[in-house]
Amino acid sequence: MKQNILFILITIFLLNNCKEVKKTDIKVNEIEEKSDSAVAIKDFREFKVLDSKFLKNETLWKDINESLIGFNQVNYDALKPLILEQNIPIIQKNIREGKLSYEQLVKFYLYRIRQFDRENELSLNSVIAINPNAIELAKIADAEIKTTAERHPIFGMPILLKDNINTKGMATTAGAIALSNNQTEDAFIVERLKSHGAIILGKANLSEWAYFFCGDCPSGYSAVGGQTLNPYGRRIIDTGGSSSGSGVAVAANFCVAAIGSETSGSILSPASQNSVVGLKPTIGLLSRTGIIPISLTLDTAGPITKNVTDNAIVLDAMLGYDAKDSKSIKTDLINGFYSNNYNKKDLQGKRLGAYKRLLKDSLYSNALTVLKAQGATIIEIEEPEIELPDFLRLLNLDMKNDLPEYLEKYANPNLNLSSVSDIIKYNNQDSLLNAPYGQSLFKGVVEDKATNTAFTKIKRTLKFNGRSYFLQPIKKHNLDGFVSINNYHAGYAAVAEYPAITVPMGYSKNGEPKGLTFITKPQKELDLLNWTYAYEQASKARIAPKQYN
């Protein structure tokens, strides 16, 4: 069944995989996939474009193939037990004990990506670029670890970045051919990762322009990277978006971890759809400088990992105050704050709101039983009748201002692009290649206008309504947080600027993953990590995709 996505955006939200919908829910649930969020209404077996018409496998690997000579299936199979589905502390332990090296770790992932990701019967199209220096950086890490004191746990770990995050030495495209030559300096969070010794393995595919571009395209599609596919059901199960490649690559064990970005559901959706852990932090906890924006009101980066342990580690590695980011939060957090304190399994006595209309979902009900067994008090709540007016206009008006600012300050000046209109014109030169699904959302950005006073009112109203949506039940029931499914309440968390995290909850009858999502007040990420760790350890819900083992 196909519907006109632009129509759904104008009615404002579509409900990802939620069958029981009240009239008001259509107004308040996830815009994420179609202006950021997940699609549950398309026939995922039919795509206008599957493999990229721009990026070829030989191009992707031409700078790295020679360095992989000598690493073969025998080497790969021997390393599998040491790496596949293991968390960062175990991988680091294997390296300290001499069972593994950083060079072998990087080669393992590169070999695996080359084997599975493109132009074969299991291809996922999740990786859009490979760092040609990754193996050399791993060799340097092997040399340094022998002569230096204890390092950050992220040291030597191969990380994929969503391809809207500026990275020196690789183009940052947002999946758009117009940006295929966008060579830049590192984004602030990339500087932080590198300062702790992380190895940037490459760039992950994404829903083009973070899913705020084409309106009627499937999640996970970009003109540069082609159609990302879900390892739990290629061409059957939606990848979620817009951090599609990041979620898929982590699920398929193509990296230790990946970095995504979210405006409204773009981490929560692909993480839940691919049975991994995705954290959308408080806006401002992580810098957005050097990340291609939709909305500097709502945008944030965040870690996507196979488990909560790795999520805490990767979050720590990106922390830092950025004076160039107007929302950057000054904190007194010390290095290791999250990764050293997340594992308390601290659910005893916590009061969590569970939405009554979701209780018909058996996975959700089972998850609540697990939470109760860990000491949580579950309070069934009705959802406040609160709308999010002009959500789409907020994104339009922000992108109209924020994307030109990125193009001026952080993009390659040789692009000769300065506005959304310029990009539309570029795409029109070859629309079949550059925009086969059209660019209706970009056209909406150009057409939308508001006075500064009107725009300020839109932002204030949305933030007030979003916070009221959570604060009303918090005050009524003395709640510590909320428990939801996938990205069902991501729109409210977005405008409220509340952090949220999703953790694998199980699988529907057709094998489609679902995530249990926790939401709480700003700067309470440690609570989210503690709650999800307790649930993760008790439920053991994640199962790796079978064909990629």
Image (cartoon, rainbow, N blue to C red):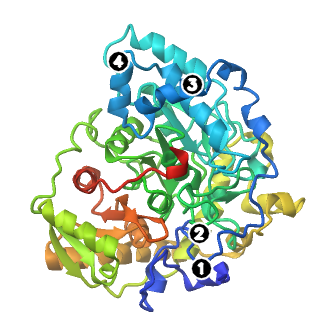
In whole angstroms, how far apart are the C-alphas of marks 1 and 2?
8 Å
**First in sequence: mark 1 or mark 2?**
1
In whole angstroms, how far apart are the C-alphas of marks 4 and 2?
45 Å
Q: Secondary structure at mark 3?
A: helix
Q: Secondary structure at mark 2?
A: loop
Q: Secondary structure at mark 4?
A: helix
Q: Which residue is mark 4?
A: 96
Contact between marks 4 and 2 (CB within 8 A): the answer is: no
Crowding at dot 1, Cα within 10 Å, few <14 / some 14-19 / many 20+, comes out as many
Q: Which residue is mark 1?
A: 9
Residue in front for this viewpoint, 245 or 8: 245
The amino acid type of the residue labelled 4 equals: Arg
**First in sequence: mark 1 or mark 4?**
1
In whole angstroms, how far apart are the C-alphas of marks 1 and 3?
50 Å
Report the disc number at residue 35.
Answer: 2
**First in sequence: mark 3 or mark 4?**
3
Q: Which residue is mark 3?
A: 74
In whole angstroms, how far apart are the C-alphas of marks 1 and 4?
51 Å
Q: Quick check: 345 above or below 203?
A: below
Crowding at dot 3, Cα within 10 Å, few <14 / some 14-19 / many 20+, comes out as few
Q: Look at the image and tell me whether residue 213 can be seen.
A: yes
Crowding at dot 2, Cα within 10 Å, few <14 / some 14-19 / many 20+, comes out as many
Report the disc number at residue 100.
Answer: none
Quarter the N terminus occupies = bottom right
Foreground tag (1 vs 3): 3
**First in sequence: mark 1 or mark 3?**
1
